[in-house]
């Protein structure tokens, strides 16, 4: 029995020496945060800790009762020291994984991305010239939003209609059927092609004339109004050939006299 006890003690001494060296190595790796080396060292330390515990248990069975208490204290100190290092290793490895995850996420997300401002829909008062723009915005953000039911969409729509347009929903109860009816009525009253075309044609026919060639601000406003009307007519499928002949006398009536003279002069030269 004495020989067996002596052999176990020698093995334990050798194992404790190996563990001490391993802990020193781990301590250096912890300072360097070498994750690859730490993972391997941690696995070895867990195995050595378990082996040491088995040797301690074998020795405690062979030594006398008076010596067991002191030996157990020393054995527990080694076990506790190993456990502390294992916890330190796991903390460093978790920190490393978290950092790598954040780095990967930052690589996926555009570094120069900007937070877009919240989209605010303009209210609609019933002007046919603005119906297409209003409906396109409303349709893309609310009407085609699958997360909203029809009653919720109707509630949104009601808050966006003012003036003549609000009369369409004034007497309608908030339900799914009335939502469909409301949209149908809005499109028939304000969104029909002939109504929109008529509105923009009237806009061209009633342009405010600019008398002075030096009034750059007024000329710019005139140009913008004509451009908007023409673009919207084209959007409704009305070709320039359909209103081009009408547009020339309208423009001549709206621009300064010196511009009209210059236009007529160049027209005669081309002939």
Image (cartoon, rainbow, N blue to C red):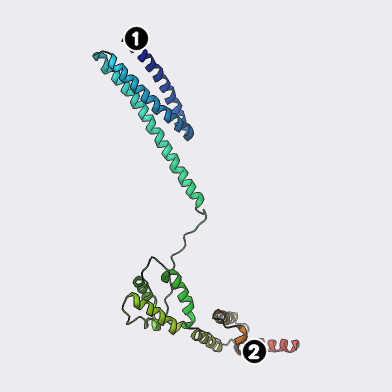
Q: Give the residue pinned by disc 1.
A: 3
Above or below, comparing residue 205 to residue 130 in the picture: below
- Please indicate whether residue 211 sits to the left or right of residue 157 in the image: right
Residue neighbourhood size for the residue with mark 2, other residues' Cα within 10 Å, grouped as few (<14), some (14–19), many (≥20): some
Point out which mark residue 98 bears.
none
Q: Nearer the viewer, residue 94 or 255?
A: 94
Q: Position of residue 64 (x, y in %)?
A: 26, 13
Q: Nearer the viewer, residue 216 or 27?
A: 27
Secondary structure at badge 2 equals helix
Q: Position of residue 241 (x, y in %)?
A: 62, 85
- Please indicate whether residue 264 sits to the left or right of residue 65 in the image: right
Q: Which image quarter holds the C terminus?
A: bottom right
Q: Is tag 1's residue or tag 2's residue first in the polypeptide sequence? A: 1
Residue occupying image coordinates x 31% and y 78% = 173
Secondary structure at badge 1 equals helix
Residue neighbourhood size for the residue with mark 1, other residues' Cα within 10 Å, grouped as few (<14), some (14–19), many (≥20): few
CA–CA distance between discs 1 and 2?
126 Å
Q: Give the residue pinned by disc 2.
A: 257
Q: Residue furthest left?
A: 65
Q: Position of residue 215 (x, y in %)?
A: 60, 82
Q: Nearer the viewer, residue 269 or 121?
A: 121
Q: Position of residue 148 (x, y in %)?
A: 37, 67
């Amino acid at each position: 029995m004495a020989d067996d006890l002596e052999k176990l003690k020698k093995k334990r001494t050798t194992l404790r020496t190996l563990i001490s060296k391993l802990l020193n190595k781990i301590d250096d790796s912890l300072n360097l945060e070498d994750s690859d080396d730490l993972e391997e060292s941690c696995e070895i330390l867990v195995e050595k800790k378990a082996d040491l515990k088995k040797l301690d248990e074998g020795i405690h069975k062979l030594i006398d009762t008076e010596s067991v208490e002191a030996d157990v204290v020393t054995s527990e100190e080694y076990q506790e020291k190993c456990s502390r290092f294992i916890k330190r290793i796991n903390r460093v490895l978790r920190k490393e994984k978290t950092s790598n995850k954040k780095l990967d996420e930052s690589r996926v997300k555009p570094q120069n991305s900007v937070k877009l401002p919240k989209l605010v829909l303009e209210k609609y008062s019933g002007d046919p010239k603005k119906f297409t723009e209003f409906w396109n915005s409303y349709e893309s953000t609310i009407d085609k939003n699958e997360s909203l039911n029809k009653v919720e969409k109707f509630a949104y729509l009601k808050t966006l209609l003012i003036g003549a347009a609000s009369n369409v929903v004034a007497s309608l109860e908030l339900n799914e059927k009335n939502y469909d009816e409301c949209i149908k009525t809005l499109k028939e009253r304000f969104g029909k092609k002939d109504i929109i075309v008529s509105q923009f044609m009237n806009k061209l026919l009633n342009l405010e004339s600019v008398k002075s060639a030096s009034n750059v601000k007024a000329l710019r406003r005139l140009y913008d109004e004509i451009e908007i009307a023409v673009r919207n007519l084209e959007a409704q499928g009305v070709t320039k050939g359909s209103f081009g002949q009408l547009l020339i006398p309208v423009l001549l009536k709206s621009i300064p006299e010196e511009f009209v003279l210059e236009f007529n002069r160049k027209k005669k030269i081309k002939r």
